[in-house]
Image (tube, rainbow, N blue to C red):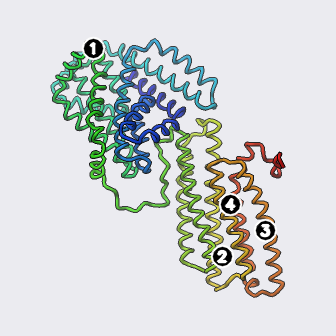
Amino acid sequence: MGGVCFLLWGLRAVRNGMTRAFGADLHAIVSKTTGNRFSAFLSGVGVTALLQSSTATAFIIAAFCGQGLLSLSSGLAVILGADVGTAVVAQILSYNLSWLAPLLIIFGYVLFSFNKKRGKMEHIGKLLMGLALMLFALMWIKQSAAPLQDSEALAIVLQSLNKDPIMALLLAAVMTWLAHSSLAIVLLLASLVLSGVLPHDVGLVMVVGANLGGAVVPIFATLRDSREASRVPIGNLVMRSVAAVAVLPFIGLAHDWLIAMGSTPERLLVDFHMAFNLALAFFFIPLTGPMAKLCIRLVPKGTEKADPAKPMYLDEKELDTPAIALAGAMRETLRMADVLQKMLEQTIIALRDNDAAIMKKIKKQDDIIDGLYKGVKLYMAKITRQSLDPEESYHYVQILSFASNIENAGDTIDNSLMEMARKKIDGKKRFSKDGMKEIEEIHEFVLETVRLAQSVFVSGDSLLARRMLEGKEDLRLREQNVTQAHMERISGGVSETIATSSMHLDVIRDLHRINSYMVSVAYPILEERGELRSSRLKKLKNN
């Protein structure tokens, strides 16, 4: 049991190290190589061979399909490749590579120790040490299982399993579900067979069970996801179940065929695991289209209306890959910015036309921003900042800061500007023609700042950031001119101006505040590039 836990811990370290070092690259590979079912299959093989987990690949594909970034048929092709990728890793690790473990520990520890908080090399070090742990664990399991050959109690249990293949299959499926890794269970079974503890025929049946159990894990993990996302693991389970039912009656023939093909007793289980998944892929790759239609019938599209205040891109299964998790948080923050832009566009209508219906829409939109902000904030809190490299830490702070400022800007519109619009409607007041024109001009300026802030947030462009800060000074001068013109109209006795004086100045003040919230996205970008003085923006050299 100690060896099994050691194996699972090493496997987790390898997977975490790979996802931390190359997670974003692996996601990009999957998204760019799924144009047809065959390239999708190959990408599944490659990515899973690196991640050493078909379950991790299934999570990625389910998320892509749930977000509409990948077709269901392509997703199923990737999953078939993932199953083969796991078999490839099992083939490699089934060889006696224990002599490599000390070297991997040494190199891994050196890389980890000398590259803390420096990005990929630290995580590659963890990956190498995790692989060494797996090799040590496999050697440990083989050595500690050897005395079990003489256990009378174990012999009775295994004899009963030999007579009841369904029980053997279910036992392996449950073990795989508990371990969350079909790879670990296949390697464990191969070690037990090599030690003479587990009969070959029982081992082959249990390999089929491990394949079934590996398909169950993603189903439970995607229960709360969208229906589009849950179709992928359902399709994977259906395909593996069909293959399991087809192969179980011929386990004996499969055993004899593999021996005839040159498979040694020591490698029989991993060779069968590979043959099972290759046959599964060979049969189902041409049928991914019909399988996709079947999955849609099994998991039909829901009739419930999506909640706009519910985050779409925050996948908790990506928390182990901060680069991907932060990208999802950034996309969710941009959703908040889109809602804020709509709110601001409609604000001028409510103020100009005394439109109560628009006011209600704006208040609902602020509730959407509040819901999204709460989701982003809680999600970001689950990302451990101690494990982030400097670049990821910078993006972490940038996302949280921008999301907070969007939420504050939304509250300003809802609690202040709309409150003034309500008073204006109740009092049946109107801004003067000149006053309304001034508000519209400043409103358009602030709206452009909101659009620009989104571009700066995504691109990190320092020239756009400078433009935003220069615009902040321009707005300050405009506000002074508008205030002076407003006071002149009061002195001139313009009745509409006198009636709405306080309201007019408060609207200008709130628009200025919203502008300041948006401009804040530019400060860290310019500060990082050394383009800020302590009190004001530096002059460009070519000026």
* 3D distance between C-alphas at marks 3 and 2: 22 Å
Quickly name the residue at label 1.
Answer: 264
Say left or right for 489 vs 345.
right
Distance from disc 2 to disc 1, alpha carbons, whole Å, reads 83 Å
> Percent position (x, y) of residue 118?
63, 31
Residue corresponding to mark 3: 478
| Quarter placement of the N terminus | top left
Q: Residues within 10 Å of mark 2 (few under 14, many from 20)?
A: many
Residue 449's tag is 4
Q: Is residue 305 visible?
A: yes
Q: Earlier in the sequence, mark 2 or mark 1?
A: 1
Q: Could you say whether the residue bearing mark 3 is in a helix, strand or loop? A: helix
Residue 370 position in % (x across, y down): 56, 60
Tell me where residue 437 sits by quadrant. Answer: bottom right
Closer mark to the observer between disc 3 and disc 2: 3
Query: Three-letter amino acid code at disc 4?
Result: Thr
- Mark 3 is surrounded, within 10 Å at the Cα level, by few (under 14), some (14 to 19) or many (20 or more) other residues, namely some
